[in-house]
Image (cartoon, grey):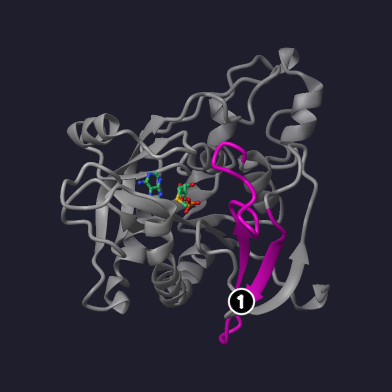
């Protein structure tokens, strides 16, 4: 499939997680599978178009057949590939466990904070090997994106609540948590749990892409006494409905998102990485600069 002439500059991307492996309710325009300096992305990037002519880039986080476990997802390649084709905004969907009674199965959640319980085995920065940068990560998600999404919550219907300003704890997995851990995360103030928020959010931040995760609750992890502990079966039993709602919500927010992008509402993050680099210009590794050109051209040489 290569209908290049029909492709506009695609500025909005969707990363689909567990249960959301395609956007095949929209018209495919083009497929790309670029090799980035950090390898290949986890799936082809499919450019799809809705009935109004709006285009988005879709990428499946775990691969189209869910082949990559959370620790294996090539997040640097995923984010780099999207940035390289011109993406400025990412909406990332994720299946999560609920750590709160009021976040019910199939509810949607917009986290605004992350607690990192990954184990340091996932490559989580573009800045290594001779070019060092330290990014501000106090607010890992984009508040304007969250606001736009929240304003369309009513399309989900009366049975689905969209919660906002919640904290997601990201564990390494692939095993689910022990009961002691589940209680611990609750005591820390965490509201939902997944295995995917990091390093994706960090890398989007380094690539200067506005990023918001939309989490969809599938289970109560294992803290709740009157519920079965999470299993893949429990998660899967909620995935189809969640995927349907995800597509509905995305369809609703797309016009407002496009407008915000066109009005330059996400411009303020551009250029931040130039100021975050601490390595003296003449000490920067040229090979690394060459790789960084792929995502932030002209920033470091
Ligand atoms: C299938 S249960 C655990 C799995 O589901 C979530 O995936 P995603 O965030 O990509 O929807 C969670 O993070 C784990 O990777
Ligand atoms: N309980 C849970 N823990 C981690 N990731 C999840 N994804 C869905 N449910 C989860």
- Considering every residue shown, the one lying at the far bottom of the view is 51
Q: Does 29 appear above or below 46?
A: below
Q: Quadrant of the N terminus?
A: bottom right
How far across and how far down the image is residue 226, in percent? Answer: 16, 52
Residue placed most toward the observer, 205 or 233: 233
Which residue is at a point 34% across and 58% down the rendered structure image? 218
Magenta-span inclusion, residue 214: no
Does residue 213 show up?
A: no
- How crowded pointer 1 is (Cα within 10 Å; few <14, some 14-19, many 20+) is rated as few
How far across and how far down the image is residue 298, in percent? Answer: 73, 37
Q: Quadrant of the C terminus?
A: top right
How far across and how far down the image is residue 18, in percent? Answer: 50, 57
Residue placed most toward the observer, 49 or 167: 167
The prevailing secondary structure element of the residues shown in magenta is loop
Horizontal side of residue 293 vs 204, given as left or right: right
Mark 1, secondary structure of its residue: loop
Q: Does 297 appear above or below 123?
A: below
Horizontal side of residue 146 vs 255, given as left or right: left
Which residue is at a point 29% across and 71% down the rendered structure image? 153
Q: Which residues are magenta?
A: 43-72
Q: Quadrant of residue 69?
A: top right
Horizontal side of residue 17 vs 44, given as left or right: left
Which residue is at a point 33% across and 57% down the rendered structure image? 217
For disc 1, the marked residue is 24
Does residue 130 show up?
A: yes
How far across and how far down the image is residue 95, in percent? Answer: 41, 55
Which residue is at a point 71% across and 56% down the rendered structure image? 85
């Amino acid at each position: 499939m290569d209908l290049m002439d029909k492709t506009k500059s695609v500025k909005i991307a969707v990363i689909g997680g567990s249960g959301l492996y395609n956007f095949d309710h929209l018209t495919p325009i083009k497929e790309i599978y670029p090799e980035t300096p950090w390898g290949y992305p986890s799936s082809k990037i499919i450019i799809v178009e809705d009935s109004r002519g709006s285009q988005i880039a879709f990428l499946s986080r775990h691969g189209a057949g869910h082949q990559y476990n959370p620790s294996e997802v090539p997040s640097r390649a995923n984010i780099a590939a999207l940035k390289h084709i011109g993406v400025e905004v990412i909406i990332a969907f994720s299946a999560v466990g609920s750590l709160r009674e009021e976040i019910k199965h199939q509810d949607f959640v917009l986290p605004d904070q992350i607690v990192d319980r990954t184990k340091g085995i996932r490559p989580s920065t573009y800045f290594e090997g001779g070019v060092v940068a330290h990014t501000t990560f106090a607010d890992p998600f984009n508040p304007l994106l969250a606001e736009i999404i929240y304003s369309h919550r009513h399309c989900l219907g009366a049975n689905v609540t969209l919660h906002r300003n919640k904290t997601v704890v990201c564990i390494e997995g692939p095993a689910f948590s022990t009961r002691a851990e589940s209680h611990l995360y609750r005591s820390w103030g965490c509201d939902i749990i997944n295995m995917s928020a990091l390093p994706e959010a960090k890398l989007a931040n380094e690539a200067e892409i506005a990023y918001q995760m939309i989490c969809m609750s599938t289970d109560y992890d294992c803290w709740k006494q009157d519920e079965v502990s999470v299993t893949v079966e429990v998660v899967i039993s909620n995935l189809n409905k969640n995927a349907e709602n995800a597509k509905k919500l995305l369809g609703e927010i797309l016009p407002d998102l496009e407008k915000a992008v066109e009005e330059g509402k996400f411009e303020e993050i551009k250029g931040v990485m130039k100021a975050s680099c601490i390595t003296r210009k003449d000490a920067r590794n040229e090979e690394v600069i060459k790789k960084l050109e792929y995502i932030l051209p002209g920033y470091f040489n």
